[in-house]
Image (cartoon, rainbow, N blue to C red):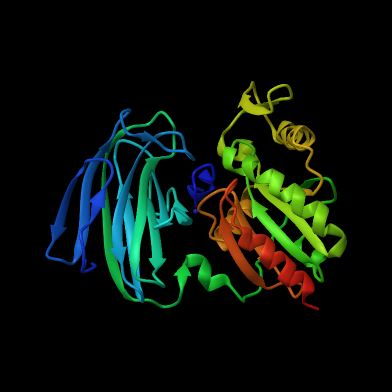
Amino acid sequence: MARYLTLAALAVFAMTAAFSNAGGVAQKKQKDKDIMVKGILTKDDVKDPQRGGPSQIHVVKLQKGKTYTIDMVSSQMDSYLRLQDAKGKQLAEDDDSGGGLNARIQFSCTADGDYRIVTTTFAANAMGAFTLTVKTAGASQGPGTAHAGMLGKAAPGLSADFAVNGKPLGLADLKGKVVLLYFWEPRSSASAALLPRLGQWNKAFKDKGLAIVGATFYLTDIGQNLTFDKETGLVKKGAKANRKSDQAILTDYAAYHKIDHLLLALAKKEALAAFDAYIVNGLPQMVLIDRRGMVRMIEVGGEKASTGVEAEIKKLLAEK
C-alpha cells in the first residue's frame, strides 16, 4: 500500500526487444531471463509530475499472456513505481509492496507492446541509487493488474467513525445505489485534482442513484501532527494533534473545496483492513460498485481520470 498510506507499513522474462531508459542509467541483461537496471536518481533528472521528485522512464516490451513482477529496490530512498502504457496512461503504481521502502508491481499483460516504467521517489526531496528488475512469473492468471481479481466480486465492507456531509455509513447502507468509492487523503495533490470531476459527477448523477463516498484515514494514526490552512487550502505541520483536530481538517478541507458528497474517516484498524482489501497502492483510487454491491471498475488517478469512469457510471445507473 502506498506510503501516504504508511498504513501499508501498518500493509524472467525473455525480452524480445531492447530495454531502454530516459535517464541514462546502466542496464544489464541476465541470460535473457530477466532485466536489471542499476541507476541513480539525481536533481538533474526530470521532475516527476505526481510525486515531485526526480524520475526516470524505462521502456520495456511486454508480452500478452505473461505476468510480470517489477521491483524497485533502494537503501537510500523510499522507492516509488508507476507503470504506464505506451501513451502514458497509468496502469498501476506502488510505494511499499516490495517490503520496507521498496516498491513492487505485479502486472498481467493483456497486449503485446511497449510499456513505460516510471522510477521515482515518494518524497519530493529524495535522491539516491536504485535497482530496477523486471521478471516473468509465467502465464497470466487473468487480465490486467492485481485489481482485476476484484472485478465482478462483492465489494469489501468498511467501517468509519466520522463523516462529513452525512453520517458514517457502511457500504451495506448504500445497497441499491451505484457507489463511486474513492480512497484519498488531504495531503495528496492528485486527490485534490480529482475533486472537480467528482463534483461534476455528483451534480449530474446524484438524483439518478449515484452515491460518491470518499474514504480516508486519521493522519495522527501514522504519526502526523498537521493542521489545515483555511487561506491557502493546504495541510501543513501543526502543534500536537489528535482525533478531533484530524476531524477538523476534513471538515475544513471539505468547506474549502466545496465538497458536497460524503467523506468518511476510518480509524487505524478499519483503514488498514479497507486499504488492504481494495489493494490501494496509489491515491486517489476509484472503485465503482453496482447496485448489487459488486465491484465493476477500479481506476487509480486524479486530474487525468479516464472518461471511461463516467461512461461506466452511466452504464451502471441504467442497469436495474
Relative to 293, is 64 on the left or the right? left
Is 189 in front, or is 157? 189
* Residue 233 vertical placement versus 261 (above, below): above
Residue 161 visible in image = no
At x 81%, y 78%, the residue is 320
How many numbered marks appear? 0
Residue 12 sits in quarter: bottom left
What residue is drawn where x is 58% and y is 73%?
Answer: 151
The residue lying furthest to the left in this view is 31
* Residue 171, horizontal then vertical, whole percent: 75, 63
In the picture provided, is 14 more to the left or to the right than 140?
left
- Along the horizontal axis of the image, is 81 left or right of 3? left
Q: From what the image shows, is residue 98 above or below residue 229?
A: below
Residue 152: image x %, image y %?
61, 76
Q: Is residue 7 above or below residue 225?
A: below
| Residue 207, horizontal then vertical, whole percent | 88, 60
Q: Horizontally, is 230 left or right of 239 in the view? A: right
Query: Residue 62: in sight, yes or no?
Result: yes
| Residue occupying the point 81% across, 65% down | 174
Identify the residue at the far right of this view. 207
Closer to us: 154 or 300:
300
Please name whichever residue, 196 or 241, is drawn nearer the observer in this view of the structure. 196
As drawn, 289 above or below 123:
below
Q: Position of residue 41 (x, y in %)?
A: 30, 36
Using the rendered view, name the quadrant where residue 187 is placed: top right
At 14% from the left and 60% from the top, the residue drawn is 30
